[in-house]
Amino acid sequence: MCGIFGCILKNGVAAPIVHAALKRLEYRGYDSVGEAAIYKNKLFIKKDQGKIDDVHAVHNLANIPGRIALGHTRWATHGAPSQVNAHPHMDCHKQIAVVHNGIIENFAEIQRELEELGHVFRSKTDTEVIPHLIEEELKDGLPLSEAVREAVKRLEGSYAVAIISVREPNKIVCARKESPLVAGVGEHGIYCASDIPAFLPLTNKAVIIEDGEIVVLADDRYEIRRISDGNPVLREPEVIDWTPEMAEKQGYPHFMLKEIHEQPLCLRNTLRLQEQYLDLMATFLERATEVYFVAAGTSYHACLAASYMFSKVALLATHPVIASEFIEQHGKAVNIDSTILAVSQSGETADTLAAVEWARQRAATILGLTNVVGSTLTRVARAYVCQQSGPEIGVAATKTFTSQLSVLSQLALNVAKRRGKISHTQIEDLEEKLQQIPDIVATILETQEAKIRQLAEKYKDKQCFFFLGRGISSATALESRLKLLEIAYVPSIAYPAGESKHGPISLIEPGFPVVFICPKDETRKTIMGNIMEMKARGASIIAILEEGDEETKKIVDDYIEIPTGFPEVLSPIPYVIPLQLFAYYMSVERNCDPDMPRNLAKSVTVK
Ligand code: G6P
C-alpha cells in the first residue's frame, strides 16, 4: 500500500530528508510520488506519476523550502496513476495538504455532500475528501487537531493520514485506523511514517500509534489522543534495534512471512470494494453466453476455485483456463457473446494479456481483476476491480490468492442475487461468513503457526508430497502444491482426490506424505474413503481439518485445525493459510530463499 512520511526539523530544510525517506520506502512498490512543505505560511507541493528518480529528475524533490514537510509514495486503488491523483491532496484554497494510506469506503457519499456545499474536487481519489472535510471543520473555528479529529470520525474504511496546514504551520497532525502509522523521535527532528524503515537512519526511537488514535507532532514533542473522545494517551518511545533490512520486513525474516501475516488486513480491504464496480462486473457476467476465467500461476488457482463458487452459488457455469492454453483450447469458440474475466495480480502477465487481446479482437467483453490500477489489464478491460492487497514482494503469491478469492466470491454472490437461484437466507449467511473471514484467518495464524513449523521440521527431508482435496478443495490442493514446489523445491503432486486412484496412487509406499484438505462439506464421505486408501498403503497423512473433527484426527498422522462452520465455497481462504506457512517453513528448513526462488519472476512478461 502507499508509503507516508512526515518530518519537522529543528533546523534546516526538510525536503532532502523527505526525498531520502521516500527512497527508503521504495521497496514497498508504488506508482506515483509527492511532497508538500510549508514555508513562510505558504504550501509548496511537488508530485507526479512515476518512479522517484524520474520524478526527481523533472521536479527536484529535494528542492522545496521549509522545515516541515510530508512525502508520499502512492499505490493506486481509486483513480489511475497520474499527476493529479498523486498525493498530497489539498482543500479548495490550498491551505491543507494530506497524505493517506488506506481506503475510504464512504468517500463517494462524503464527496457528494461536500460538492453540494461548493467544494471543488480535482482528483479521482478517495483521499481528496479528507482535506475538504478538514477545510469544512476549520470553518467552525476549530484548532487543526480538532478539525482533523472531527473529519476522520466521518471516515469509514482504513487510514493512516498525515496533515499539514498553513493555519497552524508548526504542526503535523496524523491519525490512524487499521493502516500502520508510527512516529519517530530524533535528535534533529520528529517524524511520522507508515513504517519504521522510512526514518530508521534518523532515529531508532519509535512510538507506535494504535488504531483509533490521533497524534500531533510539534517541534520536538508529540501528543497522542483518542479519536473517539479526545482523551490523552501516554506512550513512551521504544528503542528499535532492527537493521534497515529487518525493518523493511517489519521484523519478519522474509517478505513472504510478512505477507502471509498481512492477510487479515488485506482481506478486510477486499471487503471495502465499492459495490458499483462489483455491480458493473456482475452485469457483464450475467449477460454472457459463455464465461471464461483466464489466468496464470496462483491467479489461475483462484479462477479454478471461482468456477466452483459461481457454479454453486450463482448456478452459472464458467470455464477456468490457463492463460497460455486459452487460444489453443478455446480461441475459435470466442465471439461477441463471450466474456473473459482475466485475473492477474500484476496485470502484466504476457500469456494473460495475449489471451485478452485475442478475445478483444473477436469483440468479446473483457473484464479484469488485478492488484495494479494503471496496469495494461486495467487499460484493455471494459471494466475491472482491484483486489486491494497492496504490493506483494515475495515471488510466491500468498495474499494475492486469498484477496482474489475474496473478490471473486463477492462477485459470485452479486451474480447469485441477480439470478435469484439461491435463497436470500443462504446469500445473507454467506455474506456474513465472508465478513468473518479476516478474523478467522488471524486466528489460524495465531494458533497454528508453531505447530506448522514443527511439521516442517518433521517432514523436511521428504522427497515428494501429494496434495489431495475434493470439490473446491482441489483448487486449494493445487495452490498448496505450487507453493511447496516453487519455494522449497520439493517435487509435489496435486490431484482432485477422486482422481488419485487413476495413477498417482502407484507412487505410495510406507511413509509417503499425503496432505488432505478436508473440510466437513459435501465431499466428506468420499474424502474419508480416499484417506483410508492412502493409509492402507502406509502413507503418512497430514490433514487440514475442522476443529473438533475427532473422527479424522484418529486416523491421520498429523493435523492442522481450522475454525469450524465455514461454508464450502469460502473454504479455500482459511484452508490455504496453513499450507502457505508449511511451504514457507519447509523452504526455510531446506535452506532455500522463500522470497526469491530460483528461475522465477514475480511478473512474467514474456510468452
Ligand atoms: C508468476 C509469479 C506467480 C504468479 C503468476 C501470475 O509466475 O511468480 O506468483 O501467480 O506469475 O501472475 P499474475 O501477476 O498474472 O497474477
Image: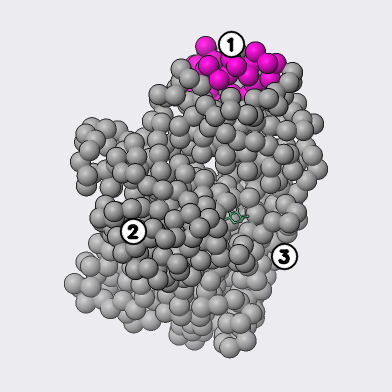
Q: Nearest the camera: 506 or 220?
A: 506
The x, y position of residue 525, in whole percent, is 46, 17
Q: Residue at x 70, y 52 (%)?
A: 595
Q: Amino acid at mark 2?
A: Ser
- What is the span of residues highlighted in magenta in the rendered image? 528-553
Q: Amino acid at mark 3?
A: Pro
In this figure, which residue is indicated by the disc labeled 1? Answer: 554
Between marks 2 and 1, how big is the CA–CA gap? 49 Å
| Residue 552 part of the magenta segment | yes
The x, y position of residue 129, in whole percent, is 33, 68
Work out whether mark 1 precedes mark 3 in sequence or the reverse, and give the earlier one.
3
Residue 518 appears in the rendering: yes
In this figure, which residue is indicated by the disc labeled 3? Answer: 201
Q: Secondary structure at mark 2?
A: strand
Q: The C terminus is located in which quarter?
A: bottom right
Q: Secondary structure at mark 1?
A: helix
Work out whether mark 2 precedes mark 1 in sequence or the reverse, and give the earlier one.
2
Between marks 3 and 2, how big is the CA–CA gap? 55 Å
State how the image is colored: one colour
Are there few (<14), some (14-19), or many (20+) residues within 10 Å of tag 2?
A: many
| Residue 226 part of the magenta segment | no
Q: Amino acid at mark 1?
A: Lys
In this figure, which residue is indicated by the disc labeled 2? Answer: 338
**Callout in the foreground (2, 1):** 2
Q: Residue furthest bottom?
A: 58
Q: Residue at x 52, y 45 (%)?
A: 301
Between marks 1 and 3, how big is the CA–CA gap? 54 Å
Ligand 1 image-quadrant field: bottom right
Are there few (<14), some (14-19), or many (20+) residues within 10 Å of tag 1?
A: few
604 over 19 or under it: above or below: above
